[in-house]
Amino acid sequence: MTNLETLNGIFCEVFSVDAEALGAGFDNKSVEGWDSVRQLSLTTAVEDSFDIMLDPEDILEFTSYDNAKTILAKYDIEL
Amino acid sequence: MFLDLDKKERTRVAAIDDSGEALTYGELCDFAAEFRRYLPERALLFLLSENCHGSLLGYVGCLSNGIVPLILSARTEESLYTNLRDMYRPAYMWAPEAMAETLGYAEVFRSHGYVLLATGNAPVAMHPDLALLLPTSGSTGSPKLVRHSLRNIEANADNVRRLFQLTGEEKAMAILPMHYTMGLSVIASHLLAGATLLLSGRSLLDRGFWSMLKEATSFTGVPYSYELLMKMRFMRMDLPKLEVITQGGGKLTPEMFRALAEYARDKGKKFIATYGQSECTARMAYLPAELALEKTCSIGFAEPGGQLSIVDADGNETFEGEATGEMVYRGENVTLGYAYGIEDLQKGDENHGVMHTGDLARRDADGCYFIVGRLKRFLKIFGLRIGLDEVENLIKQEYKADCYCKGDDEKLVVLVTDPSLVEALPGFIEEKTHLFHKNIEVRLVDAILRNEAGKVINQ
């Protein structure tokens, strides 16, 4: 599985959506039920899957699909 | 006046919310007087709450004027809201401006982002002691409500004020929702003390929360709040103003409990674990900060103004010495009872100051209580109380299928016999309860076995 597929899989699982739904605009403003429980679930799954430890700042910024990609780039995860 | 609000200095700040604006005690009192002009002497009102000034003013306006609010989350799922509305037929609504139009009632007046709406419903008969209604579960929208008197609320506020020795200098982080008994307890106790509430509806993963926390002298959370705080490594942050961290709404793991106790010791702060139920206007017991390291996971002693005891398996009640059994609480914060429907609003005090908690507790030789189990059928996940019977009823109504709910404070487990429900239920339960689907497990079983008494035996 590619890194992108792994990331997509995490989003799909947490929000119960298909990968087609992901993209620009998939964020905490427009996605129903995006709360702290789900955000933390995302970041925990990302940490486990990519074997990284996110800075608290990055956990706070993990508020959209696009942000997630930008943040992963900071940890040298190529998507 | 309610919580002696008119005895505080008028210019003192009562609350700051996410808008950054300050609300003074004088403004609270003036609003209460204004609110009275638009309402009859006694009425039932639905308060659709958010943690903001408008919502707080509605609460104070109601309680100061004999208007009985049922406080519901403004995010309550629509069919659950409709169910409660049709069942209790409130004459008024106090709702966020953004929701007012959808609700479709006549506007009476608006203030601070909230609107008073008249539904046109006839007045409801209510007992003179009834002052406040709260849902037993913040989420499943059960029509079962807890009936509070004014004395319940003021006794709780005073007990909590004494327990934490609150003064007017306090700035309390108030992030627990207002429709949740402990959220209201934080609000009432600090208003009684003349302190300042930092009222926030933000997520703990929102930058705004963290800048507010830097100003706070105390933080009150449920176990899940502390999971988030620890994930954000707040223990390494510089929070010089923070003096007290306190927890309620379920059990912390021993590891988290110890970590918080050690953090408090190392940083010169106080960690105070508490215990409570909505049936007793939130708080009932607390572990004094100086015992936090020694008595891991204990809920300590009864709060000032309350009394705890244990009734053992033989029915013997004891107040001291080692014992295990159902924990019983006595105090003026024990609520009047439940309401299951509109007729129950006429009922008076059914508990008479005594609450059989439904929790199994152990008391050690030092008199400290530890919760070891539960007699009543509910879980507490992320501080949300999930009534198992209520979830079963929701499923049975929707799918006409047999099911059985169990679980622990991590996970709700639903046993079903119909294979098609395995896929459908997590989404359905998530929608109805706001519980995260990862904390729901649906298990397919051949049969749900019941004994002669109807009790399910396949555990």
Image (spheres, helix red, strand yellow):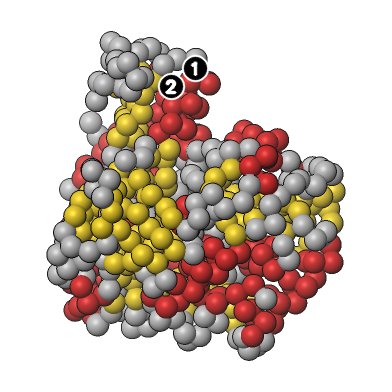
In the rendered structure, find residue B424 and report the number of the disc placed on it: 2
Task: Sort mark 1 into few (<14), some (14-19) or many (20+) by Cα contacts within 10 Å.
Answer: some
What secondary structure is marked by label 1?
Answer: helix
Which of the two residues, A75 or B35, is positioned nearer the viewer here?
B35
Q: Chain of mark 2?
A: B
Which amino acid is tagged 2?
Ala
Which of the two residues, B329 or B434, is positioned nearer the viewer here?
B329
* Residue B293 horizontal/vertical position (percent): 17, 70
What secondary structure is marked by label 2?
Answer: helix
* Residue B171 horizontal/vertical position (percent): 47, 79
* Residue B415 horizontal/vertical position (percent): 33, 22
The N terminus of chain A - image quarter: top left
Is residue B20 rendered to the left or right of residue B413? Answer: right
Task: Check contact, mark 2 vs mark 1: CB within 8 A.
Answer: yes
Position of residue A34 relative to residue B59, above or below, is: above
Which image quadrant is residue B287 in? bottom left
Residue at the spot of label 1: B399
Is residue B15 rendered to the left or right of residue B238? Answer: right
The C terminus of chain A - image quarter: top left
* Residue at 25% over, 21% down: B458
C-alpha separation, residue under disc 2 versus residue under disc 1: 10 Å
Asked if badges 2 and 1 are on one and the same chain, I answer yes
Residue A23 at least partly seen: no
* Residue at 36% over, 28% down: B405
